[in-house]
Amino acid sequence: MATPPAPDRSAATWDTARRMPRWLPRAMVLAFVLAGVFELCNWAVYRLLGLFILVLVAFFVALAMEPAVDNLAARGLSRGLATGFVFVLLYACVAGFTAALGVLLVHTVSGVVNEFPRLIDEAVGWVNSTFHQDFTVAKLRKRLLEESDVISNYAQSAANHAWGLSYTVLGELGRFLTVALFSIYFTVYGPRMRRSMCSWLPTERQDMILRAWDLAIEKTGGYLYSRALLAVISALAHGLFLWALRIPNAIELGICFGVIASFVPIIGTYLAGLLPILVALTIHPIDAVWILIFVVVYQVFQDYVLQPRITAHSVDVNPAIALLAVMAGGALHGAVGALLAIPAVATLQAFLGLYVKRYEVAEDPRIDRVGKSPRRSRRGKDRAAPVSPEVGE
């Protein structure tokens, strides 16, 4: 009886190797699903990032207003009425300041435009007498007419950007209303939000959340109230100085200067100083120099004398960290983000100071780097060490 041929094991092994593993299709589908979910989340985060920042700004505004609302509520006023009163007062001040600033800008620009021919004549006369030139206004006008293409192109570009400017103004108004609505909501329902948040946590975790909330209220409110006090002092000082120089609208200019210089970080002082300097240039140009000197001197006095004393009990942040926080906040949300960056960093620093363990630092000359180097100090100690007397002497 003939034996059957043995099966070709090499061919079976080759077919098995070429066959797709059972887990591979599921893995490919899962990979495609995860990639789609990632792209969807990335798109959603990109779209909602602006709204998230607005909500965060509104939350910090609510934190700053909550002490005033709590004080009114403790005196018998309902929380809704107290919140309405505080925010109506706040936004009325903001609207009044914005209107006053707009009126001052219009008056200043109109004054500069009216005095522009005289300023040009005086500037040309000063250049001719100082540098021994023979410029005239007619020559400058002719040169401008020759460069009319540049002027017309600039005018056309400005006209093309008019709709873009209107869209920007409407967008900023919408952001302002969003922040206002959310800040009012966070303030009115602050106790309910804290109670709801604590209900999701065990008892030992609730104290941490409430303490962090209290720190945020303390640091944010203290920072903004300290800036408001600095703004009042700055407005009085600059208003009196401008009044002494007989600058028109001295009190209004002083108020605008105090608010802008105190609430716009880093560049606020320089922006606020432009308006009174322009006004002084249209009346008595030498007064612009005195205003510039006074602004610089007062800024140094505020940074090194007033501000450390006023903010000592509210915000204690390293200057380098504060500058970095302001730049990051400005990059995220402009002037409002820069304003709220320091209280946010101060809150985080205070919270970490409560729950991060710190250790006592041993005295070591290498820390302060004062005096001799450690190697030399050790040699000096070795040489100066007294020799113990021998036994029997």
Image: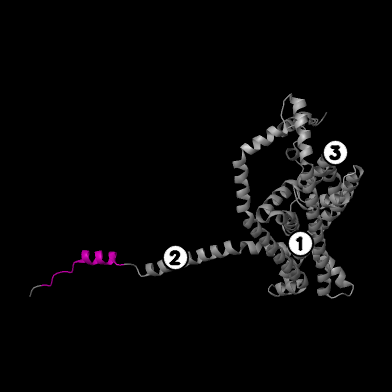
Distance between the Cα atoms at labels 3 and 2?
73 Å
The percent coordinates of residue 169 (x first, y second) are: 68, 59
37 drawn magenta = no
Give the quarter of the figure containing the N terminus: bottom left
Q: Nearer the viewer, residue 312 or 7?
A: 312
Q: Secondary structure at mark 3?
A: loop
The earlier-in-sequence mark between 3 and 2 is 2
The percent coordinates of residue 323 (x first, y second) are: 72, 48
Give the crowd class for mark 1: few <14, some 14-19, many >=20 residues within 10 Å: many
Residue assigned mark 2 = 31
Residue under the image location 82 percent in, 39 percent down: 288
The percent coordinates of residue 180 (x first, y second) are: 74, 66
Label at residue 139: none
Give the quarter of the figure containing the C terminus: top right
Q: Secondary structure at mark 1?
A: helix
Looking at the rendering, the stretch of residues picked out in magenta corresponds to 3-19
- The amino acid type found where label 3 is placed reads His
Please say whether residue 111 is visible from this viewpoint.
yes
Residue assigned mark 3 = 284
Which is closer to the viewer, label 3 or label 2?
3
Q: How is the image coloured?
A: one colour
Q: Secondary structure at mark 2?
A: helix
Q: Nearer the viewer, residue 104 or 95?
A: 104
Give the crowd class for mark 2: few <14, some 14-19, many >=20 residues within 10 Å: few
Outermost residue to the left: 1
In the depicted structure, whether residue 51 falls above or below residue 255: below
- The amino acid type found where label 2 is placed reads Ala
- The amino acid type found where label 1 is placed reads Ala
Residue assigned mark 1 = 216
